[in-house]
Image (cartoon, rainbow, N blue to C red):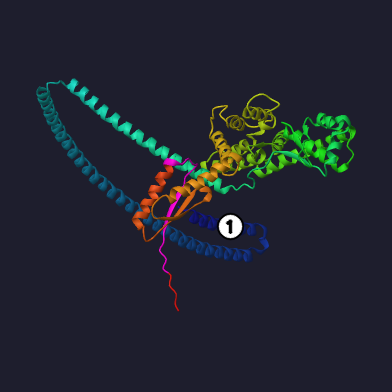
Amino acid sequence: MNGPVLAVIAAVGGLIVGAAVVYFWARLHTSGKATASREEAERAVADAQAQAKELILAAKEEAHAFRATVEEDARERRSEVQRLERRVLQREENLDRRSESLEKRERQLTQREEELEQQREKIDELIAQQRVELERVSGLNREEATEMLLRSIEVEVRDQANRMVRQIEAEAKEEADERARRIIVNAIQRWASDQVSESSVSVVPLPGEEMKGRIIGREGRNIRALEMATGVDLIIDDTPEAVILSGFDPVRREIARQALQKLIQDGRIHPARIEEMVEKARSEVETIIKEEGERAAFDAGVPGLNPDLIKALGRLHFRYSMGQNVLKHSVESAHLASMMAAEMGADVNVARRAALLHDIGKGVSHEVEGPHALIGADIAKRLGQPAKVVHAIAAHHFEEEPQTVEAFLVQAADAISGARPGARRDSLESYVKRLEALENIANSFEGVEKSFAIQAGREVRIVVKPEDVDDLMAARIARDIVNKIEETLEYPGQIKVMVIREKRVVDYAK
């Protein structure tokens, strides 16, 4: 029996028991009013019985409704179970059909394997028969024939491999040369230097010829004091209104030049004043060295250099190599090396730093024995530069064998900066001659009207006579000029030859 029905029965029983208790209690304590109490008790009992009947009816109705709900839920569950049973049966049927199909496929595959095995046995028999026949015809057994075939294949493969290797090497060399030319040309075209060449002669102008005597002093004491204080020789000759300073150290020569200029302006020339002016000039030159070194590092984009490196770099401001200022050459080399390193995917910072510092050994080369490349590398190493930078500095003139890409780039940047047309005195003349030779080669061909060497000798433009040269002949002239340039001239990079055939017709309306 369910819970609601039990609750209703318990309630009815409680009402009946309560009514009985009330009845007996009234009977025991109200004897004087027995009749009235009896009637009242009977009415209470009747009311309780009526309420109990109503509660029983309600409980039965509730129990009936609950039973209907339970039966409906049970029917739905049975329907769901039946549906699931049907799905399971259907899946089992599908699995049975698939299993039968797989078994059929397996039987077919087994049969096919047996047939293939039989065919393989037949093929093996035929191969064996053919081998016996080949051995009989050729007079060679299997091992001898195999060895002969392998030797023949080896020779053929080696020959093909050698041809492929030569072809790959030629293509790689051609591609590498082309890329190297392109990188170098791009770097040269991107960098435009504001300096070509400067003179390294130190000449101090004089306001008059009488100043020479004052500089010499009584019995030569002034000139001796100046030479001893500066370490520079003063040459006073017949050069009008000028004194020449001679010394192997450009820094000392600059100190002497400034000191002498100050003495000339001051007018008081005697040993004590000379020493004072030399010390003042030395202090000013040291300041210039520091400023020039800092400016060069900033221009080249190399921050954080050691102060001693800045000074060593600044000393190059007073040095010249074949008419080219070494400090400007170093800054130019740094830019060229960094641009080429960026093109090649190398370490740009290492290339830039090493190229900027590659000639710092020239500032002290007269004080320390050895090549300036190794001296500069030792200075850079002592002042905390990275190993790659030190190696690139030491290897830029092959005092060490280059081991890194950056070392080769520093070599190339150094050579490009020094060999750039007009950079040094000895290359200017050859540069002009090369331009003239290009135009002479172009003008030597029949049908050429005029030619122009442009782009610093990297391009030649030839104008041909349109009435004497057709389009095919123009192409042949361009090819012939290229061949003659390659045969007769030496030049960096590549030269573009452009042949222009243009016909102009002019008339006038009157």
The answer to whether residue 201 is left or right of residue 408 is right
Q: Quadrant location of residue 310?
A: top right
Q: Residue 342: in sight, yes or no? A: no
Magenta residue check for 492: yes
- Please report the bounds of the magenta region as a residue range: 487-505
The residue that mark 1 highlights is 20
**Residue at the bottom extreme, as displayed:** 510
Task: Name the amino acid, label 1.
Answer: Ala
Q: Residue at x 73, y 32 (%)?
A: 249
Between 84 and 32, which is closer to the camera in this rendering?
84
| Rendered position, 292 above or below 7 | above
Coordinates of residue 384 in the picture (x, y in percent): 67, 30
**Position in image of residue 134 (x %, y %):** 12, 25
Q: Report which quarter residue 312 is drawn in.
A: top right
Left or right position of 255 against 180: right
The residue sitting at 44% across, 77% down in the picture is 509
For residue 411, which quarter of the picture?
Answer: top right
